[in-house]
Amino acid sequence: MTEPNFATLVSRWYEENARDLPWRKPDVGPWAILVSEVMLQQTPVVRVLPAFDAWLARWPVPAALAQESPAEAIRMWGRLGYPRRAVRLYECAVAIVERHGGEVPDRLDQLLALPGVGTYTARAVAAFAYGQRHPVVDTNVRRVVCRAVAGQPDAGPTTRPADLVATEELLPLEPAAAALASAAFMELGAVICTARTPHCARCPVESSCAWRASGQEAPAGPTRRPQRYAGTDRQVRGLLLGMLREATGPVPQQRLDQVWTDDVQRARALAGLVQDGLVEPAGADAFRLVGDGPPQPVADLTH
Ligand code: SF4
């Protein structure tokens, strides 16, 4: 009898140990999976859970979101961070309605053509929503493959074509089994083969792991330095966006000026929000969330 291979071992472990998350339920649809993948890109699971439930309760299908405004998407996004993702999801919903009759497409090329949907998200939706065989490679998967196969402590900062190839080589040929393995690799990287404290003693592939066999220590320090927030433009952007999110219409410049005393930094943060398509001028001396009302003439931000 042959030994179970890498994907089989990790998939078995996953079936017994996977966290019970709402986007993994068997009856969850492609739209919910797309929403979860976008939310999870830069936000921890624990913060995504309530936002995911609220989003799907309000917009259970793409058409429901498409008939609202990007401003409402930004409001619902709340404090999840990186709010451009909310606008991208709104644009995605519109594109899904216009190009695909309101159904999230199942073809990889069509998924990749949706606004803001990149290599990872397109493959994640194709695999987890439609049971297709694609390498779904995020930071966690890159780290697992890098350690278990290549014997290196950590992967590089971005996904390269070689990472997709290395992961695809580990997938079973049968599509449903490959999709399961993809979810299992991600989970293993998220909860067992973590960046700084891998729990090798509990790992289903410990006996064959190249990095474990090499006897190397886990990287000692954080792989990324925590980003400073207080006093940064990000904080000012958050304050401005918070005020605009809570308003029911345009907010006069005078009120926005009260959120931060440094005029130069405040103006830079506001201009950044406009440039990112999150905020727009509403008349000469006011601003609002993008699409939050009828079109307005564009004001000159330099004045
Ligand atoms: S044995 Fe350790 S390093 Fe290797 S894949 Fe498992 S958790 Fe990661």
Image: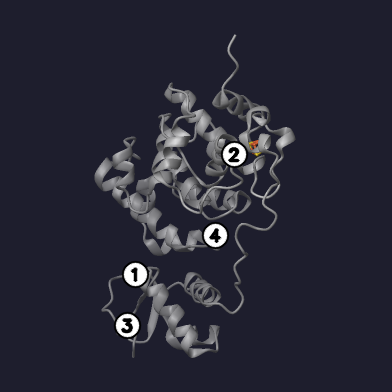
* Residue ID at (43%, 29%): 131
Separation of disc 2 and disc 1 at Cα?
A: 55 Å
Q: Is residue 209 left or right of residue 92?
A: right
Question: Which one is earlier in the sequence, the residue at label 1 or at label 3?
Answer: 3
Question: Which one is earlier in the sequence, the residue at label 4 or at label 1?
Answer: 4
Dot 1 crowding, Cα within 10 Å, few <14, some 14–19, many 20+: some
Quadrant location of the N terminus in the rendered image: top right
Question: Which one is earlier in the sequence, the residue at label 3 or at label 2?
Answer: 2
- The scheme the figure's colours follow is one colour
| SS state under label 2 | loop
**Label annotation for residue 283:** 3
* Residue ID at (52%, 29%): 181
Q: Which residue is mark 4?
A: 80
What's the amino acid at mark 2? Gly
Decide: is 208 above or below 32. Answer: above
Camera-near label (3 vs 4) is 4
Q: Which residue is mark 1?
A: 293
Quadrant location of the C terminus in the rendered image: bottom left
Residue 20, visible in the rendered structure = no
Q: Is residue 174 left or right of residue 180?
A: left
Question: Which one is earlier in the sequence, the residue at label 3 or at label 4?
Answer: 4
| SS state under label 4 | loop
Camera-near label (4 vs 2) is 2
Separation of disc 3 and disc 4 at Cα?
A: 29 Å
| SS state under label 3 | loop
Q: Quadrant for residue 71, please give it.
A: bottom left
Residue projecting furthest to the top:
1
